[in-house]
Image (spheres, coloured by chain):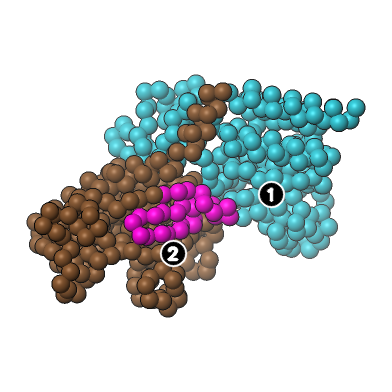
Chain colours: A cyan, B brown
Amino acid sequence: MKQIVMPGDEIDSSIGKPRNGVYKCGDQLYCSQYFGIVQKSEQFVDIVPFSGPYFPRRGDKVIGKIIEVGPSMWTVDINSPYYTLLHMNDTPWRTNAGSIKKFLSTGDYVYAKVMTVNEIKESWITLKDVGLRKLEGGHIASIQAPKVPRIIGKGGSMVNMIKDATETRIVVGQNGLIWVDGEPENVMAAIEAIKVVEREAHTTGLTDRMQKYLEEIKGGKNGNSV
Amino acid sequence: MGTASDIKLIDENGLRIDGRSPTELRPLKIETDVLERADGSAFIEWGGNKILVAVYGPREAYPKHTQDIEKAVVKARYNMSAFSVDERKRPGPDRRSVEISKVISEALSAAVMVEQFPRAQIDVFIEVLQADAGTRIAGLTASSVALAAAGIPMRDMVVGCAAGKVDGKIVLDLGKEEDNFGQADLPMGILAKSGKIVLMQMDGDMSQEEFEQATALIMDATKRIYEIQREALAGKYRALALERSGE
């Protein structure tokens, strides 16, 4: 069972080098910043909080909602304490200042990459990269940002499993927003599966259990269609 | 405080009016994630106190002039319901609750890693549903649980506890009668691991020895309260993890 820690708990640095979610609380001493679990990787120890806000980091691919259209920029909500900006020159379209509304208007969702973040947490995103686009149709589900790696799984194993089993298209943003597209009942099933993973992210043997869970869904679906 | 009365607050066996020993806490229970919409929440029952705490944020600070370019501001709001006390309390902020909001905000700012969120604010709403002496430290104790549940980075947990002087004796965790008719009340907020004091107020008077004795009582009691905080937070996660690994 994974160890649960509170803010201020000392981290045993003999099992690995402390990395994320810790702070220096003395000479050669590291303490947890979060209420979460201790996660060991090859040589590092991280504290993964059970919940918490998303902070944009350069290179993250996120899902954002357009909340305001300016003359040359969109203001985008990326489920973080701070809004982010998307400039018209950072899109693949030929845009003219003042008429950018026809490309993206308020309420639209985009799959974008964080381009820069400065010291005061102002950030800019871009749509100029492979796979980045406006998300048309589909549903948006929201989970706690620290649990995103668990939804994706090792090399995307978990999300691919859900995609295959529910026959949906899924895009996972690092910020905890997830876009799901497909037949309505499949979308509901996929979101339900995602919620299960989120709820049980801190337990062991989750992949095997999810496999069983998803096979049941698949089996049920085939049974109905026959 | 300081109201003269004939009530005997400590009997000949050294027991208090509610039957507790001088170093005993009132029954304490904390529950987390009681509100769906809040980022983190907690409900505390401490003796007759019933307090609900909701945490929102960090989010961009408004009004804009309250923003700090270097760090987040913790905005705690302590509010007593009209029905929380015997006689109806006039709703809205008054001198007392503004003061308590201020000292709780400052106590929490000492624990929260505010430098990680420039320009942001963290809202902590403390709603006292039923008051029975020691609401500020009960509110503080629950706030720190709610902040941890919201996933906000903190250096340490904040634990609140009070001690006081009743019938000339130093006792822990004053009840309502002891607060009203005792000689001193000393609420304190402490960082659980480091033992640093982040809130301290005193009503009434004590000698230096009495003060030291009271502080020692509080320091000892915060360890017990801290364990309750930990269990309130980790309990259900641990239960689920155990259940799943047992399958």
Does residue B80 show up magenta in the picture? no
Furthest residue to the right?
A226
| Chain ID at mark 1 | A
Residues at discs 2 and 1 in contact (Cβ within 8 Å) = no
Q: Point out the frontmost of discs 2 and 1.
A: 2
Q: Is residue A78 visible?
A: yes
Query: Helix, strand or loop at disc 2?
Result: strand
The answer to which quarter of the image holds residue B132 is bottom left
Q: Position of residue A88 (x, y in %)?
A: 74, 53
Q: Which mark is residue B129?
A: 2
| Chain ID at mark 2 | B
Q: Position of residue A42 (x, y in %)?
A: 50, 21
Q: Does residue A126 appear to the left or right of A27 in the view shown?
A: right
In the image, is residue A215 above or below residue A53?
above
Q: Position of residue B86 (x, y in %)?
A: 37, 72
Pointer 1 local density, CA inside 10 Å: few below 14, some 14–19, many at least 20: many
